[in-house]
């Protein structure tokens, strides 16, 4: 009698296991075959991020570089922008019919991202499948939450920490007390206070390394500047003729520099500040 009870329990357990397998296995094995957009990564040239209840962020791509055009005017961080463009890779296993947008927190959405002309609205995450509801192109889909996770809702989160834009190649620096200028043949020369120093004369390689410090350095942090006053400034002229005045706001306990053209304040370590304002420091490295 006992053996029959055990046999029946085993059969019941097997039946339950097979039922669970049949229910879940097809869903797990079904590949995500519905592409949410025909857009390709390289085709995206404009992005709009519209957080619910917050200011929209607009970005545009020019000459291969992304720039925030509203509500700020500054270079965008390439890594952060890539995460937004990754939406073009999103796929879903099914399209939900007659979806209730309010039920899925899509009316209005938590955040809407528009790539070129196609909008993607992000709603809540499904409690069972841990996938996120996304409305786009007239349908609602369940996609992995990695596409919606961490979408920046503050423009400052998208700011590049690079002091100079990708296409800005410095050819002249005017600190007031001294000037350092590269001629048409690529040779650097110093004039003013710097030229009369008793320090060891700098080589062309020293000047080139110093110019590269400006070209490639990244700040510890970036924030909007509201026209802070400064006792010193430097005007940097770039290849092509563009010139930008930068105000030195402070040198300690951290070095702060503000660009007048984009109204951004850049925070650096003290040592970086010394290298940017004196090529002799770079030459001693």
Image (cartoon, helix red, strand yellow):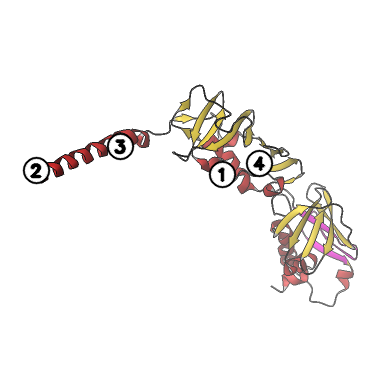
Q: Earlier in the sequence, mark 1 or mark 3?
A: 3
Picture layout, residue 142 above or below residue 81: above
10 Å neighbourhood of mark 2: few (<14), some, or many (≥20)?
few
Residue picked out by circle 2: 1
Q: Could you tell which of marks 1 and 2 lies nearer the N-terminus?
A: 2
Residue occupied by mark 1:
149
The quadrant in which residue 41 appears is top right
Of 81 and 64, which appears nearest the observer? 81
Q: CA distance from mark 3 to mark 2?
A: 29 Å
Q: Is residue 240 left or right of residue 110?
A: right
Q: Bin the neighbour count of mark 3 within 10 Å (Cα to Cα): few under 14, some 14-19, many 20 and up.
A: few
Q: Position of residue 144 (x, y in %)?
A: 49, 39
Mark 1 or mark 3, whichever is nearer to me? 3
The numbered mark, 3 or 2, whose residue comes first in the sequence reads 2
Q: Which residue is mark 4?
A: 64
Q: Which residues are magenta?
A: 169-191
Q: Position of residue 260 (x, y in %)?
A: 84, 51
Task: Please name the residue that numbered disc 3 is placed on.
Answer: 20
Quadrant position of the N terminus in the picture:
top left
What is the CA distance from the residue labelled 3 to the residue labelled 4?
A: 50 Å
Closer to the camera, 256 or 66? 256
Q: Quadrant of the C terminus?
A: bottom right
């Amino acid at each position: 009698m006992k053996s029959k009870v055990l046999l029946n329990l085993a059969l019941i357990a097997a039946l339950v296991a097979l039922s669970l397998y049949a229910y879940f296995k097809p869903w797990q094995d079904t590949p995500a075959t519905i592409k949410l957009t025909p857009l390709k990564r390289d085709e995206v040239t404009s992005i709009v991020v519209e957080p619910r209840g917050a200011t929209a962020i607009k970005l545009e791509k020019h000459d291969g570089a992304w720039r925030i055009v509203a509500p700020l005017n500054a270079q965008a961080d390439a890594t952060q922008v890539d995460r937004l463009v990754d939406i073009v890779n999103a796929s879903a296993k099914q399209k939900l019919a007659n979806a209730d947008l309010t039920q899925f927190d899509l009316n209005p959405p938590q955040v809407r991202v528009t790539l070129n002309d196609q909008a993607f609205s992000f709603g809540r995450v499904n409690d069972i499948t841990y996938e996120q509801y996304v409305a786009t192109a007239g349908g609602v889909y369940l996609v992995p939450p990695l596409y919606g996770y961490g979408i920046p809702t503050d423009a400052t989160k998208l700011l590049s920490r690079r002091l100079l834009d990708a296409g800005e190649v410095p050819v002249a620096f005017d600190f007031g007390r001294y000037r350092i200028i590269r001629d048409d043949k690529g040779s650097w020369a110093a004039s003013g206070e710097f030229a009369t120093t008793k320090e060891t004369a700098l080589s062309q390689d020293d000047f080139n390394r110093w110019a590269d410090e400006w070209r490639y350095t990244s700040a510890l942090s970036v924030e909007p500047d509201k026209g802070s006053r400064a006792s010193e400034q430097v005007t940097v002229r770039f290849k092509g003729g563009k010139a930008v005045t930068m105000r030195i706001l402070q040198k300690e306990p951290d070095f702060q520099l503000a660009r007048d053209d984009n109204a951004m304040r850049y925070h650096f370590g003290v040592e970086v500040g010394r290298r940017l304002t004196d090529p002799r420091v770079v030459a001693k490295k």
